[in-house]
Image: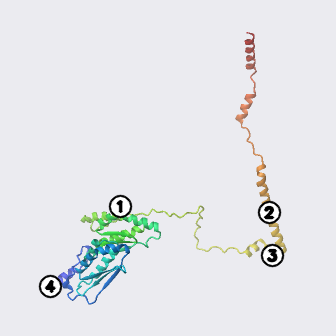
């Protein structure tokens, strides 16, 4: 077996960590004949980006010309166009150039956007506008992703090695493919009401665990923070809740019809005059009952209130006060007479 065959066999073996694989560089010698047909991509940009794009467009043309591409800026239509030429030898570079002008249309500066032309750098434009229906919630969650003074966004950038820009209804990310995957997960979970701090903590813990070779083949879930949704429904609960009936496999009995009720009470067999007399009797009884209640309500103000019976203690005090001490009164009178004589 030759060396080349051995190398081929080694390359086809399963890989433990696919992210560690290096992508082989694509050179001009790999495609000496160039492209067969011309390809082009156009992207519209908002009016407020026109001034910036006009300033940096010479740099954009210079950058794409290194890869044998052409770039055009149409200020009338408000569009950017990238095209291949006959000298273009890399078939995928036109896709990379398309991503670059897309990022520039989404307010990414040219210095960052041109990095996407590198082989190991990709981009991802995440649409977040339709993930939350209420505008107030959407603004709050988008602000939560940015954080105070952009601190949360900066920490995401440091942990994922990606450039992240939140603009309008989209989040633009630019960096290595593994980092882009992590950024997308964080953004989508944030818009689904999971605070980004949980994912940032998880990424920091994973980074530390990767340094320990003993934990390479172990489950890391016990080290990662677990998010529990504590949100309680704000829907108003009814005051009187109906108790749940016990489950029975049999269907409920059929409710009685009007004829069934009349048969049970005997009303069904009465003639028209008897039915009218019965109805009249019920109505008069009802009216008499209502009149009685109304009289009671009117006479309620004229009913004398009930007086409380005097308590035993009070009765004892009254009886003790009514008794006169004769001896003490006699002594008092004698004393008074003495004073008058003297």
The residue positioned 17% from the left and 82% from the top of the image is 6
User: Mark 1 highlights which residue?
Assistant: 149
Vertical order, 305 against 206 (above or below): above
Which callout, 3 or 4, points to the residue nearer the camera? 4
Q: Provide the secondary structure element on which disc 3 rests.
A: helix
- Is disc 3 in contact with disc 4, using a CB cutoff of under 8 Å? no
87 relative to 204 in the view: left or right: left
How far apart are labels 4 and 1 at the CA level?
61 Å
The residue positioned 84% from the left and 74% from the top of the image is 273
Quadrant position of the C terminus in the picture: top right
User: Mark 4 highlights which residue?
Assistant: 2
Which callout, 3 or 2, points to the residue nearer the camera? 2
- Is disc 2 in contact with disc 4, using a CB cutoff of under 8 Å? no
Residue 120: % across, % down: 25, 75
Which callout, 1 or 2, points to the residue nearer the camera? 1
Per the rendering, the mark at residue 269 is 3
- Is disc 4 in contact with disc 1, using a CB cutoff of under 8 Å? no
Residue 266: % across, % down: 79, 72
Is residue 238 visible in the rendered image? The answer is: yes
Residue 107: % across, % down: 34, 72
Q: Earlier in the sequence, mark 4 or mark 1?
A: 4
Per the rendering, the mark at residue 287 is 2
């Amino acid at each position: 077996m030759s060396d080349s065959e051995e190398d081929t066999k080694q390359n086809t073996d399963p890989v433990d960590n696919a992210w560690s694989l290096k992508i082989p560089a694509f050179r001009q010698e790999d495609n000496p004949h160039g492209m067969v047909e011309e390809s082009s991509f156009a992207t519209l940009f908002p009016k407020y980006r026109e001034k910036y794009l006009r300033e940096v467009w010479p740099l954009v043309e210079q950058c794409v010309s290194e890869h044998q591409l052409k770039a055009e800026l149409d200020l009338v239509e408000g569009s950017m166009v990238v095209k291949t030429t006959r000298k273009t030898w890399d078939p995928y570079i036109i896709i990379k150039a398309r991503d670059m002008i897309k990022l520039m249309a989404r307010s990414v500066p040219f210095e960052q956007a041109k990095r996407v032309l590198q082989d190991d750098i990709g981009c991802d434009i995440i649409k977040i506008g339709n993930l939350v229906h209420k505008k107030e919630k959407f603004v709050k969650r988008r602000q939560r992703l940015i954080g105070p003074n952009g601190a949360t966004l900066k920490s995401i950038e440091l942990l994922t090695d990606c450039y992240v820009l939140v603009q309008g209804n989209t989040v633009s990310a630019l960096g290595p493919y593994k980092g882009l995957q992590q950024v997308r997960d964080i953004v989508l979970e944030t818009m689904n009401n999971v605070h980004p701090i949980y994912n940032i903590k998880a990424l920091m813990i994973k980074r530390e665990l990767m340094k320990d070779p003993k934990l390479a083949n172990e489950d890391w879930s016990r080290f990662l923070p677990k998010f529990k949704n504590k949100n309680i429904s704000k829907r108003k609960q009814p005051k009187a809740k109906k108790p749940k009936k016990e489950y029975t496999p049999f269907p409920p009995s059929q409710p009685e019809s009007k004829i069934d009720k009349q048969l049970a009470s005997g009303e069904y067999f009465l003639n028209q005059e008897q039915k009218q007399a019965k109805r009249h009797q019920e109505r008069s009884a009802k009216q008499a009952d209502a009149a009685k209640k109304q009289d009671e309500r009117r006479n309620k103000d004229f009913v004398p209130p009930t007086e409380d019976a005097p308590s035993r203690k009070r009765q004892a005090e009254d009886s003790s006060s009514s008794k006169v001490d004769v001896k003490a009164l006699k002594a008092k009178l004698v004393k008074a007479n003495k004073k008058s004589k003297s």
